[in-house]
């Protein structure tokens, strides 16, 4: 069985910049559009074969994730947006260059940004001090199972590294020989 790709029109007004990795068959994406001097971000939702605009904000959002409970969380430098399946809510963010969001629920989500790992407690984002927990590395990606157990992967010196955790608590999972290259 071969793989094939088919071009699909998502939204004629927005440039798609991020797509979620859902646990269901629905897809979520973020699309940027500009009117005059204002940038806006649209939440694009695909279900049953068609794309629709679900929500829009007049801010730049960079990353989106579908959490284990099915809620959708997106973030940018100034704003975060949460869809809990019934209603949309916005809150301050502060995530510069966010590129990955994951977690079990809005009360326990994480994001990787240019400034490191962040934890979302359902109300606000807080930076996770991995160094203080003995977890060192340049983190590239992360994910979690539906129960919230998370993994982050990256590199430290010349070695690959892995840490596990959830929320604000993480542990180094590299073999002892790789911890201090």
Image (spheres, rainbow, N blue to C red):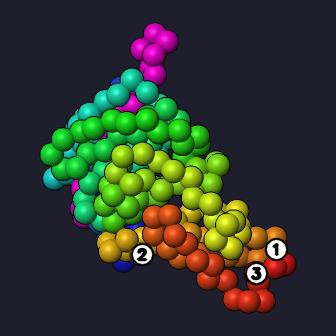
Specify whether 69 is left or right of 38: left
Secondary structure type for disc 2: loop
Q: CA distance from mark 2 to mark 3?
A: 22 Å
Q: What segment carries the magenta color?
A: 24-43
The answer to whether the residues at label 2 and label 3 have Cβ atoms under 8 Å apart is no
Quadrant holding the C terminus:
bottom right
Which residue is label 1 attached to?
Answer: 158
In-front residue for pair 63/106: 106
Which residue is label 3 attached to?
Answer: 179
**Is 171 rendered above or below residue 18?**
below
Q: Quadrant of residue 145?
A: bottom left
Which residue is label 2 attached to?
Answer: 149
Query: Of marks 3 and 1, which one's residue comes earlier in the chain?
Result: 1
Secondary structure type for disc 1: loop
Q: Main secondary structure of the magenta part?
A: strand
Q: Residue furthest front?
A: 132
Quadrant holding the N terminus:
bottom left
Specify whether 144 is left or right of 138: left
| Residue 132 coordinates in the image, percent (x, y) | 67, 66
């Amino acid at each position: 069985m071969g793989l094939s790709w088919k071009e699909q029109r998502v939204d004629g007004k927005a440039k798609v910049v991020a797509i979620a990795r859902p646990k269901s068959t629905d897809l979520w994406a973020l699309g940027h559009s500009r009117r005059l001097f204002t940038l806006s971000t649209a939440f694009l939702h695909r279900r049953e074969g068609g794309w629709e605009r679900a929500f829009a904000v007049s801010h730049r959002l960079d990353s989106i994730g579908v959490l284990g409970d099915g809620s959708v969380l997106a973030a940018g430098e100034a704003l975060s947006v949460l869809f809990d399946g019934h209603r949309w809510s916005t809150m301050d963010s502060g995530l510069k260059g966010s590129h990955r969001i994951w977690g079990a629920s809005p009360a326990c989500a994480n994001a990787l940004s240019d400034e490191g790992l962040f934890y979302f407690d359902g109300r606000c984002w807080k930076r996770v001090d991995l160094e203080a927990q003995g977890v060192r590395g340049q983190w590239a990606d992360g994910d979690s199972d539906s129960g919230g157990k998370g993994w982050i992967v990256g590199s430290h010196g010349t070695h690959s590294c892995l840490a596990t955790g959830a929320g604000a608590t993480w542990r180094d999972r590299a073999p002892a020989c790789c911890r201090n290259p």
